[in-house]
Image (spheres, helix red, strand yellow):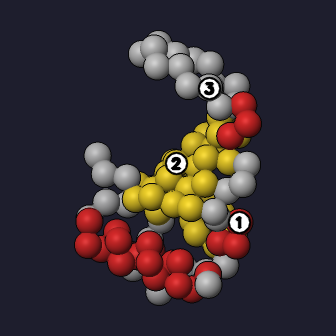
């Protein structure tokens, strides 16, 4: 299944031209840009998906504040320059346009 997920993500990115993704695991919401070496994913590991500029938030503590100045998620979300996510932990994903 891992190989199929990577290929599905790659096809969607190729057709949409967008590399921003939101990934859900059973406990986390992760936003970031899919890293593709040289624009291709032939060198990607089939067991992991690599994100750049990732924001990881715990779902149990996530608030739904709609205020423009909302900072209630600051303590439950963490930023990473690079993040590898195990494919078998992904529950769902969405490619996010600008």
Disc 3 to disc 2: CB gap under 8 Å: no
97, 91: nearer the viewer: 91
Mark number, residue 63: 3
Pointer 1 local density, CA inside 10 Å: few below 14, some 14–19, many at least 20: some
Secondary-structure class at tag 2: strand
Residue 84: percent from left, percent from top: 65, 63
Residue 51 in the image: above or below residue 59: below
- The answer to whether residue 52 is seen in the rendering is no
Residue 58: percent from left, percent from top: 70, 40
Among the 4 quarters of the image, the one containing residue 10: bottom left
What residue is drawn where x is 68% and y is 48%? 28
Residue 2 in the image: above or below residue 32: below
Q: Which residue is mark 2?
A: 31
What residue is drawn where x is 57% and y is 43%? 55
Secondary-structure class at tag 3: loop
Secondary-structure class at tag 1: helix
Q: Alpha-carbon distance for marks 2 and 1? A: 15 Å
Disc 2 vs disc 1: which is toward the camera? 1
What residue is drawn where x is 47% and y is 62%? 34
Is 92 positioned to the left or the right of 35 in the image?
Answer: right
Is 77 positioned to the left or the right of 53 in the image?
Answer: right
Residue 11: percent from left, percent from top: 36, 78
Q: Which of the marked residues, 3 or 2, is nearer the chain's N terminus?
A: 2
Q: Alpha-carbon distance for marks 1 and 3? A: 23 Å
Q: Which residue is mark 1?
A: 89
């Amino acid at each position: 299944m891992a190989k199929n997920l990577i290929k599905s993500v790659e096809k969607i990115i190729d057709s949409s031209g967008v590399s921003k993704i939101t990934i859900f695991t059973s406990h986390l919401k992760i936003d970031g840009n899919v890293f593709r070496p040289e624009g291709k994913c032939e060198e990607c590991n089939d067991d992991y998906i690599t994100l750049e500029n990732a924001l990881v938030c715990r779902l149990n503590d996530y608030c739904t504040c709609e205020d423009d100045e909302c900072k209630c998620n600051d303590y439950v979300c963490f930023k990473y320059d690079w993040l590898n996510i195990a494919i078998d932990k992904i529950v769902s994903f969405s490619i996010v346009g600008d």
